[in-house]
Every structure is written in C-alpha cells, then in structure tokens.
Image: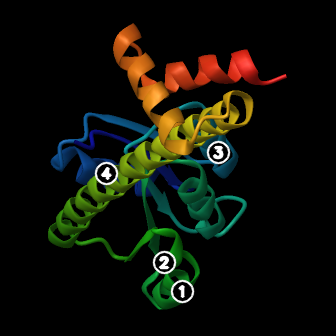
Amino acid sequence: MMKNALIVSKTESGIKAISALLSDEGFDDVACTLSADDARERVDTGAFDLIIINTPLDTETGLEFSLYCAGRTKSSVIVIVKQEKAYEAFDIVDKHGVLVISKPLNKHLFHHYIVFTKCFKERMLSAFEENEKLKSELEEMKVINRAKLLLIQCLSMTEKQAHRYIEHQAMNMRKSKLDIAKQVIRTYEN
C-alpha cells in the first residue's frame, strides 16, 4: 500500500496543493522539495512509493527528472504538466512508465490517478519479483549444470548419473542441490 511520497515543485503553492490532495488520499509521509538537485539527492538516498513532479522545475523541465526516477527507483512516478504540453510530455515519458497529468488538477480525477498508480505499482512489483525469482532459478540451474559437467568429465558419469548423484547427495546430507553442486565444483574444479 502506497503511503509515502515525494513532491517536487518549484513553487510553495504547488507543493501545498499537491500535499492537500495526497493527504486526502491517505498519504501520511510526504517529503517536499523546491529543487531538482535536492530531489535527485532524496531519490538516491531514500525510497518513495510515489514521486510527483510539478513541472517545470527550477533548472529543468521536470521530464528529465521523471525519467531519472523511473530508471532508478521502484516508485510510481507522476509528472504534472500544462495542458498544452501534455501530449508532448506523454510522448517522452510514456514508454518509461511515467503517468502524465495535465493542469489544472481535479480532485476526483487525481483520486483515480492515484488508484491507477497503486494498481500499476503492484503489478510491476509482482512482475519484478517473478523476474528476480526466475533469475535466481536460472543461476541455480547454471551452477548445477556446471557441477554435472564436472562429474561427467572427472568421474566419467553420464548426465543421468550426475543428476541422480546430486539429488541423492542433497537428500542424504539434507542440503539443497545448489549446495551439493557448489561442493562438487570446489572439489573437482582446478
């Protein structure tokens, strides 16, 4: 559940308006900054569920910073732009998963945008976790296959025998196949 946010706006009035909207949405921990440089530092040192960028910023348009956040964090990122700049902004940030909202902000629509970002973030995190799990399984398979190859080369086992050997050792020693494979590699690799 999203509850902490970072607001980046070059005006106090922008921060105040967005803070009020976020408060209505149940965000209890909202950090605010008037500077793009300070915002980058905060993003690099802290984790936020949501980052809202009210463009333009003090030293840039804000689109660059939204891409920076999208590329370096797991945060949902919303960029708020003038209505006449919305399509241009969308073309730049859309493929990076940044949501574009045009000014003026509407409380009812803002609520829907927040709900959308929560749903999107949950799906993204689920996909990220699944991807990490698959990467881990792939790395484990590589180590086990390397151990099998060493058993085949060093002990003249067949692939099937090497596979059974690792499985039986894991079961008998109450260790994972990965642990056994690492032992095999340490033993037979020079």
CA separation, marks 1 and 3?
A: 23 Å
Question: Which amino acid, by three-letter code, is at mark 1?
Answer: Asp
Mark 1 and mark 4 lie on one chain; the one further toward the N terminus is 1
**Element type where label 3 sits in the image:** helix
Name the residue nearer the viewer: 47 or 56. 47
Tell me which residue sits at (27%, 43%) in the image. Answer: 2
Q: Is mark 1 on a helix, strand or loop?
A: helix
Mark 4 surroundings within 10 Å by alpha-carbon count, few (fewer than 14), some (14 through 19), many (20 or more): few
Residue extending furthest toward the top: 173
What percent of the width, then of the height, locates residue 111? 18, 63
| Residue in view at x 48 percent, y 42 percent | 160
Tags 2 and 1 touching, CB below 8 Å: yes
The residue singled out by tag 3 in the image is: 40
Of circles 2 and 3, the one toward us is: 2
Q: Give how far across and how far down residue 15 sits, in percent.
A: 42, 51
Q: Mark 4 points at which residue?
A: 126
Whether label 1 touches label 3, CB < 8 Å: no
**Amino acid type, mark 4:** Ser
Residue 110 higher or lower than 183, as above or below: below
Q: Name the residue under label 1.
A: 91
Q: Mark 2 points at which residue?
A: 94
- The label shown at residue 17 is none
Q: Which of 117 and 149 is in front in this view?
A: 149
Task: Depth check: give the residue in front, 168 or 96.
Answer: 168
Mark yes or no: residue 174 visible.
no
Task: Say which quadrant the N terminus sits in.
Answer: top left
